[in-house]
Amino acid sequence: MMNSNLQSHSKIFKIALLGNPNSGKTAIFNLLTKLRHKVSNYPGVTVEQKMGIVKLNNGRLAELLDLPGTYSLTPESLDEKIVAEEVTKWVHGIHRPDAIISVVDASNLSRNLYLTTQLTDLGIPVVMALNMMDLVKSGTVDHHQLSEKLGIHAAIPMSAKEKWGVNHLLDGLWKVLESPPPDCSFMIPLNIPAIVSTTLEPLTSIFKENFQYSPRLAVAQALRVITRNSALELYRKIIQTLPGLDDNLFEKLIDTRGEIIGQIESLNYSHRILEATLRYAMIDDMVKSIQPDNEKILKQVTRSEKADRILTHKWLGPAIFISIMYIIFHSVFTLATIPMDWIDESIHKIGDIILRTMGPGMLRDLLVDGVFGGVGAILVFLPQILILVFFLSMLEDSGYMARVAFLLDRFMTKVGLHGRSALPLISGYACAIPGIMASRTIDSWKERLITILILPLMSCSARLPVYSLLIGAFIPAKLLFGFISLQGFTLVTMYILGTVVAFILAWIFSKFIPIQGKSSFVMEMPPYRIPIMGSVFHQVFTRAKLFLKNAGQIILAISIVLWFIASFPSSPNSVNGNHVEDSYAGKIGKIIEPVIKPLGFDWKIGIGLVTSFAAREVMVSTLATLYSVDNGENSIVHLSSSLVKDINIHTGKQRYDVLFALSLMVFYVFAAQCMATFAIVKVETNSWKWPIFMICYMSMLAYGASFLVYQGGRLLGF
Amino acid sequence: MEFQEIIALVFGILALLFVIKKLVLQFIRPGSDPKCEKCIESHNRFSRK
Amino acid sequence: MSEKLTIAQLSPGDSAKIVGFSGPTELQSRLVEMGFLPGVLIRLINQSAFGGPFQLKIRDYYVSLRKIDTENIIVEKLI
């Protein structure tokens, strides 16, 4: 007795959270773990597993694993594959959790229960979190009946949105962890015709003999394996990993499966829909007593449907979508002005304080010109980025993105993409990296690859400071037609440019990449919801933290290094501002200059292009540092006026003009700069081939487009 | 003045080392940088269906 | 005996009962997993412009399907 107490004291339980997409899994994960989880840097669609710690009701701890949403353990898309692979490991004793929480959307019972019935076959205790009870009329879902019919310990009604039921869930969890229910794994509760059972025998025997599956699990796995190839593929890796297995076991599986499929078809059953047909027969039976009137439910018009009548309307739908996008980008420019000015002033004030309180010397110059000048120039743009992220996450959280995929699917397929490409691509406006990861929901390889290849052309938020700086300095603050700001319009044009070229390239790429299998578009349209402001602000804060961390680390480091190489060798003649030109930095810039001169860039921009490889926005802090070092006066420079007022000593003319600004912006639309993006592409595609290809095509595009704009503009007389 | 120079130089060297470390990491261990925490290793198989 | 047609031939607002599938079977498994089975009721909401996807209500939730998939699902219109 003592021994088991000691043992149980030190054991940390492992619990897994599984459920359909949009069932509220992540909200439940957050409620259970409170803040005790590592926040993934990129909230939104859950595409990777998240781990957190739950404090159970008696003080014991458990590890909670949140997995991407899935409709079935027979995977369709990559993210579903991730879940299926993980579950396959559990079945073979690797990382096996002590309990599974099956999250079910009560307003959407049948489809959600599909996954639950699959989970109950695994031989791991299951507790159901019957979520979204707030959407269901009270008394219509009998959770006792549900748990009884499914053979699980408990189905706990709750609402993550209204934050109730969590404690009951923890109670239910503890009960199964403390005293795991007996393994009722003999018979699978599906109504399988005898002749089908017999046909499945060879396969179930292989499972029982080689993997020691219970009879119930053996049948469940057999049914899955004959449904889709992807389910069979799951065994390839696991067979390699497990010790003591027959060398040609996988081939044996393939052959047996092939034979059985042939036999099933000859019995007039379609092997592809056998599992689903059997499971739904059981589910419909179960649900009949709970939701008797199907036709009434069908005819019911929900509020979301009313909204969709307009938002997915043939003509109004696309028109509204374009308007929303325009408003977002335009607001980013206009709403951010006040906070940006405030940050700008504050940084200058701090710079002045340092100047006044520190004696002259190298450290003071480093701090004022390098640190505050360089990093400060970037911090100013934080409000713009946050406003963009705010709007984008409102869009995502509201459920509107599924409608966007619906509206755009036809167009997307014509250019080689998929309706589901919409969310990753739009996420790319914030940052390409989560967008690339979100492409895991696209089930077809070709469409996923093309989405990844063109994603970086969706101008990410790191380009905003560069666009903003150049537009602010060189584009006049006029109004077109009396109400459209020319500056705002230029900004939107840059975004449109990137987006349009991305689609053109997608179309071109799709001609060269072979199709692999068909892709489907069965996409749930979840009910609209008022974005949970907590979640939206969480995303905004996360982005802010990331931005500040970036600024505080890599940008700071580069600014410091740059300050050194721009300040030495120090020329005694600082009056005519020559000394940066003669420094190491200047020399490096001059080497690059001939290559970029046709684009309208000079050595200063050249230095910025080199440093931008760390992060695109570093261009801004680089220019700020260069001008600060050059500046004889003791204060932090105002970068945009420095750019405009910069006179080339040798020619006597203004260094930079509108055409230059357009050329540099166009360069930034297309250039391959963010090394981290390519690192992720390498990880996601498991090959260096694709990132290298991307760097090549983007570099050529950037140079070519910039050249066209600058030289073309000059030719036209600008 | 000397004191300021020393501190400035220390910052400079630390900064340089940091930049070099980040640069090298991008190549030898892609995805180990801030992003892609807890990436599931299974996604490394970019399998075609 | 009500007429058998495909979902693609329904008009917005129509309700129907699924009776079967036709055409290539590769994509049927996902459809069936999502609940598209003979005997199940659906209602057409909208179609996206230029031959785009169809939005339907099935059982108790909403889903969108590509036109080509709707051409392979046979239904009986409900009055």
Image (spheres, coloured by chain):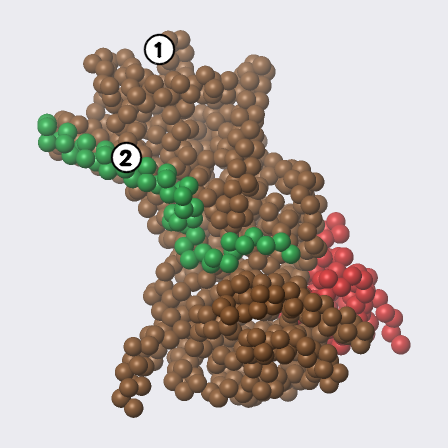
Chain colours: A brown, B green, C red
Query: Toward which corner of the image does residue A16 lie, by quadrant?
Result: bottom left
Query: Toward which corner of the image does residue A643 lie, by quadrant?
Result: top left
Q: Quadrant of the N terminus of chain A?
A: bottom left
Label 2 residue SS: helix
The type of residue carrying mark 2 is Leu
Q: Is residue A609 left or right of residue A482?
A: left
Q: Mark 2 — on which chain does it sit?
A: B
Q: Is residue A480 above or below residue A267?
A: above
- Residue A679 place in picture, x, y as percent: 46, 44
- Residue linked to disc 2: B16
- Residue A458 place in picture, x, y as percent: 54, 41
Q: Is residue A472 left or right of residue A440?
A: left
User: Measuring 57% from the left and 75% from the top, which residue is drawn there?
Assistant: A210
**Residues beneath discs 2 and 1 located on the same chain:** no
The type of residue carrying mark 1 is Ile
- The numbered mark at residue A649 is 1
Q: Pick whichever, A265 or A616, lies toward us.
A: A265
User: Measuring 56% from the left and 37% from the top, which residue is drawn there?
Assistant: A693
CA neighbours of label 1 inside 10 A, class few (<14), some (14 to 19), many (20+) = few
Q: Is residue A611 left or right of residue A315?
A: left
Disc 2 from disc 1: Cα separation: 32 Å
Q: Pick whichever, A273 or C70, lies toward us.
A: A273
Label 1 residue SS: loop
Q: Is residue A11 above or below residue A675?
A: below
- Residue C58 place in picture, x, y as percent: 69, 70
